[in-house]
Amino acid sequence: MLADPRHSDDLDSRIAAARAAESARVTGAPRPPAKGYAQGSRVLAELIGAPLGGGLIGWVLDRWLGTSPWIMLTLLVLATAAAFRNIYRISQERAE
């Protein structure tokens, strides 16, 4: 008994799609990064950038105003708190 031709066409198209996907995987076709990867990069940028920026701005203001180290320490603490607040907000987003 022969197979139903409708199922044969469906199977052929599925095989062709699988072969195309495999050839793209093997050739290393670029894929967009997952959202989770982007969220991780944002967290890393917050952890490094905010305290570094706050410390640098505070250091410059301390040098300029002669209040060393108080403005730098204050801005460093505020920048770190802002970074953790932003990380909390990032963690509330849904990774897909």
Image: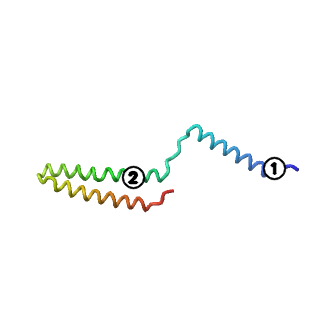
Badge 2 vs badge 1, beta-carbon distance below 8 Å: no
Compute the Cα span from label 2 to label 1: 52 Å
Foreground pick, 71 / 12: 71
Foreground pick, 44 / 13: 44
Q: Given the current orientation, which residue lies at the most extreme top position?
A: 27
In the image, what residue occupies the spot 78% across and 51% down?
Answer: 7
Of helix, strand and loop, which one carries label 2? helix
Is 29 situated above or below 6?
Answer: above
> What amino acid does circle 1 point to?
Pro
Picture quadrant of residue 79: bottom left
Q: Which residue is mark 1?
A: 5
In the image, what residue occupies the spot 53% across and 45% down?
Answer: 31
Q: Is residue 95 left or right of residue 53?
A: right
In the rendering, which numbered label is found on residue 42? Answer: 2
Q: Residues within 10 Å of mark 1 (few under 14, many from 20)?
A: few
Residue 24 x/y as whole percent: 60, 40
Picture quadrant of residue 27: top right
Residue 33 x/y as whole percent: 49, 48
> What amino acid does circle 2 point to?
Arg
In the image, what residue occupies the spot 47% across and 60% down?
Answer: 94
Q: Nearer the viewer, mark 2 or mark 1?
A: 2
In the image, what residue occupies the spot 59% across and 38% down?
Answer: 26
Colour scheme in use: rainbow
Q: Is residue 12 left or right of residue 73?
A: right
Residue 4 x/y as whole percent: 82, 52
Q: Given the current orientation, which residue lies at the most extreme left position?
A: 66
Q: Is residue 63 left or right of residue 29?
A: left
